[in-house]
Amino acid sequence: MANQTHGSLAAEAAAYLRESAEAMEGGNGIEPEIRRQADCLLEWARKKNLILTDSFTDGLEKFKSDTLEHVVYLRPSDRRVIKCTKPGRFGLAHGADGCYGRHVPATPLFYLRRIELSNREFPTDLRLEGIALGKPDFGNKEELRPYIVTSQRLIEPIDVNCQNPSEEEIAASMMKLGFKLLPENVYNWVRESDGIVVTDARMLNFILSDEGIIPIDLIIAKYPTPAPANRSPAI
């Protein structure tokens, strides 16, 4: 599987959802759409032999504090960070009607496109590892639901005691890439030339490394150009 994940599995899975389920990238947190896409994603993973078992994370070091979106592990064999969305959930998406920073539950398609865009815009090296099943913390808690497993190369900080860049350093880095702040929140950025919107650009979501400032957990989507105030993401 390792060689497969070096390619564009996320893009392939996203294409399958669009073609097979006519999936919407922005579901505005609507549970039936999220569930429908999740079932379709599970179907794709079975066809590709990409279903992961619980043993996938056996023996891996679990990070002490999970994020709102992921359970996180370290895989020492290839120095990659394993990130698992919560069962039945697929991270967060930008809010509706232009309220980008008011995050809502994401559809699987939004999350897969987020992987693609993160790799395109930043040196994140995110890879889709596969799809697993687990018990959710909502609804029927005994029903196994799909979740997405990704990996990202371990980013080594310059200073382990001060791993994150300052807000000023983040702002300078984002502006160098052509982004400007959105007015409603200091953590939300837009690049009007191509409609890319990045939110949750907090200090904890970047590592200051020898390579520069590397993001590790941004919420990113592409909107029609210029990025309007009341539209859903472009598919």
Image: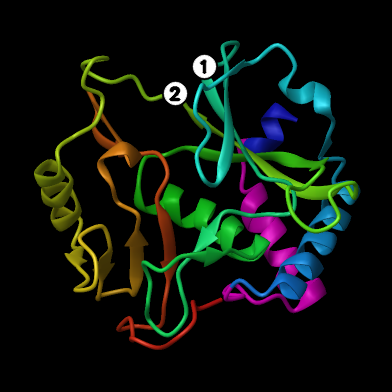
Task: Name the residue rendered at 86%, 55% in the picture.
Answer: 140
Q: Position of residue 198 (x, y in %)?
A: 34, 61
State whether residue 218 is above or below residue 55.
below
Q: Is residue 34 left or right of residue 170?
A: right
**Picture quarter containing residue 230?**
bottom left
Residue where numbered disc 2 is placed: 154
Position of residue 114 relative to residue 79, above or below, is below
Percent coordinates x, y for residue 115 in the rendering: 53, 51
Q: Amino acid at mark 2?
A: Leu
The residue located at (45%, 68%) in the rendering is: 94
Q: Which residue is mark 1?
A: 79
Identified by mark 1, the residue type is Arg
Q: Which stretch appears magenta?
A: 6-28
Q: Which numbered disc flags the more N-terminal residue, 1 or 2? A: 1
Marks 1/2 in contact by CB < 8 Å: the verdict is: yes
User: Mark 1 and mark 2: span between their CA atoms?
Assistant: 6 Å
Determine the residue positioned at 25% across, 75% down: 193
Q: Give the crowd class for mark 1: few <14, some 14-19, many >=20 residues within 10 Å.
A: few
Instruction: Tell whether 80 sits left or right of 84.
Output: left
